[in-house]
Amino acid sequence: MSIGMNIQSEVIELSTIVVNSVSKILNYYVKCNIKDPNDILVENKKICGVLVESKSSGSTFEQIVIGIGINIFNEIPKDLIEIATRLKDHCDPPSIPELASKIAVEVINDISKSLIS
């Protein structure tokens, strides 16, 4: 999933905010940990990656695009089985639209809070 935002704000550490937001939601379903700077692991296997791209002018953000990749249902290739996992192997996962909407709300709320403070 991707989230795009037009904002006028001083540069903040977006990647940290986003990965924490996604981790918060995923922790409702399975115990996960953050591997800096932008991965989320379950049982030491990658389940999610976050990428944040931004356009800035000086020290001010103008636009950001957030990419969030979560393996929910896809089979893990045999050559990656030791380092990757999927949500389905750890819980009864929500639908993709349900999970995407929960994550989008959390990410936008957490970014908004950081812009206000």
Image (cartoon, rainbow, N blue to C red):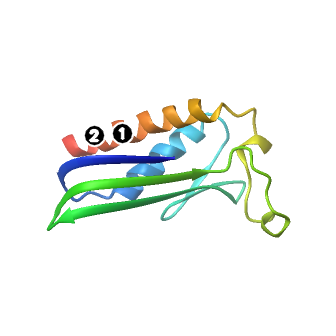
Above or below, 106 against 80 in this view is above
Label 1 to label 2: alpha-carbon separation: 6 Å
Outermost residue, left side:
58
- The residue located at (76%, 41%) in the rendering is 88
Residue 78 in view, yes or no: yes
Residue 117 seen by the camera: no
Residue type indicated by callout 1: Ile
Coordinates of residue 97 in the picture (x, y in percent): 57, 32
* Crowding near the residue tagged with mark 1, few <14, some 14–19, many ≥20 C-alpha atoms within 10 Å: some
Q: What residue sits right under mark 1 in the picture?
A: 108
Horizontally, is 60 left or right of 30 in the view?
left
How many C-alpha atoms fall within 10 Å of the one at disc 2: few (<14), some, or many (≥20)? few
Helix, strand or loop at disc 2?
helix
Q: Amino acid at mark 2?
A: Ser
Q: Residue at x 28, y 39 (%)?
A: 113
At x 27%, y 45%, the residue is 114
Left or right, residue 5 beside residue 3:
left
**Label drawn at residue 64:** none
Q: Position of residue 70 (x, y in %)?
A: 61, 49
Instruction: Give residue 10's position: percent from left, percent from top.
Output: 17, 56
Residue 112 circle label:
2
Residue at the right extreme of this rendering:
78
Where is 115 relative to 77, above or below?
above
Q: Nearer the viewer, residue 101 or 33?
A: 101
Q: Secondary structure at mark 1?
A: helix
**In contact (CB < 8 Å): disc 1 and disc 2:** yes
